Amino acid sequence: MSESVIDGPLKEEEGFPESGHPKGLYTLFFSEMWERFCYYGMRALLLLYLTESLVKGDNEAFLIYGAYTALVYVAPVLGGKLADQLLGYRNAVLLGGVLMAIGEFLILGGTETWLYIGMGAIIVGNGYFKANISSIVGKLYKDGDPRKDSGFTIFYIGINIGALLATTVCAEVGKEFGAPYGFGLAGIGMIVGTIIFQLGRKNFESKALPPDPQKLNAPWMGPLSRFHVTIIGSLAIIPAIYGLMLFPEVVGYLLAVTAVLVIYNLLSGAIKEGPIWRDRMFAMLIMFAFNIVFWACFEQAGSSLTLFAGRNVDRVIFGWEMGAATTQFFNPAYILIFGSIFSIMWIKLTQMGKNPNIPAKFGLGILQLGLGYLVVYLASGLVGEDYLVPLWTLALLYLLHTTGELFLSPIGLSMVTKLAPKHMTGTAMGGWFLSFAASNYVAGILATATGQSHGGEGGDEEAVVTAADSLAQYVDVYTTMGLITVGVGILLVILSKPINKLLHGVT
């Protein structure tokens, strides 16, 4: 691309090497990699910990899991806004990393109470970390830089290296030695990620400073500055989250109220910027809605698909039985295989003038997700008397889910930084993660359709079923899910052209 596309030459002293990507991308790559090791390590073990160690029934465990993962993604709404207006992105990410590590170690208390308190610390920490490190990535690139999509896809590969390590190392450590060892390992990973971020700050710090350092650090409430009050307030939120974990149904109402506020803030802010920004914001909100559809079905990976793997999948390979949680490794492994290919593919398709528009990419991603679930239906005809489908069922399902994800998720991250006014990047990124929050909560509800085993607390309404009945129920639910999402994907592809007009040239 010519230098004029990015408003001038790429100079080494500006952090842009003569070729490739800005230096800060690689610092953020490794920081995010270890943060995802922390999050996915905990997530890989959570449902099995709830159903086996804490003896929860399927449906109660699904609702707790859904509420937790929903709050993990709703927290960036507040974290992004605080970073935009007060903390700056660097301070927010550092605070988030520390809180997440503390949360993992609190879970080692070994009781339901310590689990929920640890969850609270992880949720608050993730709110500061997740949205704001993505915002820094976006700010490394100038307007119109054609490498932004490629940069976000590289960043996404870092996410999935962390996820792969988590779903293999943490999951197997948890299987062999007990879940607490896996949780502790996840906490150590978070410490490593935070140290990397701090040591590499010179590569991005100018993009991540507080908007008004004097206001942030000056005394505000007696001797306490706004920074001190923010830390104290963040810690005070943890007991409230503990209460939400006890009553996970309340999270749905919280999400609804938060969604209304976020949509109002985004629309009102964009309208003030003029009709072009207004249209772009409308388009982005439409994409948020379809994002919910995709991830509500995709996020069965850590819940119902994990239990499906444990109950109706033959996981023995050359005499070794893979842990049910470890089957989640397929997705990040495929990301590592195909992520670079997709990164190059988008650039080549742009050069050829054949790169699908953003809504079409979303639609094709949802379509592939649906086809993945239909694989379970095909494999169900091959089972024997043990009613176990072969492991390739999950291998192929996750392959289609992953290619669908690569059409949608890294493109979505880049989309937010392109369609939101610059001063609203953090808030818009928070809105993006709010759509993930809604999808995770819905995912927990969808998973209850597969709830089967008779657990301890909360398991009264669930019946013990045979392997045959278990498989039949999974096949029925996943087939329905697949057919609906295939239809939604086709619909979005059809609507992609009129939606794309609202982007006003953004690709």
Image: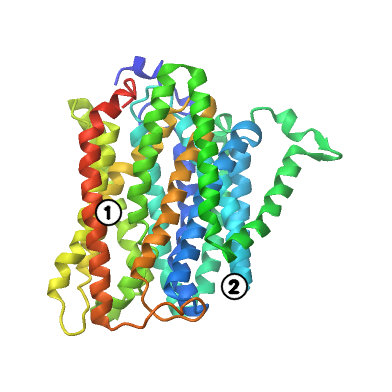
The image shows residue 139 at horizontal and vertical percentages of 48, 30
State which quarter of the image contains the C terminus: top left
The residue at the far front in this view is 461
Q: Does 112 appear above or below 350?
A: below
Cα–Cα span, label 2 and label 1: 33 Å
Q: Nearer the viewer, residue 152 or 245?
A: 245
Q: Nearer the viewer, residue 344 or 482?
A: 482
Q: Residues within 10 Å of mark 2 (few under 14, many from 20)?
A: some
The image shows residue 437 at horizontal and vertical percentages of 47, 50
| Residue position marked by numbered label 2 in the rendering | 112
Q: For residue 275, what is the image quadrant?
A: top left
Left or right: 147 as drawn, with respect to 425? left
Q: Nearer the viewer, residue 394 or 294?
A: 294
What element does badge 1 sit on? helix
The image shows residue 199 at horizontal and vertical percentages of 58, 44
**Residue located 41% across and 55% down the image:** 442
**Residue located 49% across and 81% down the image:** 456
Q: Which mark is residue 390?
A: none
From the viewer's perspective, is the residue at label 2 or at label 1 nearer?
2
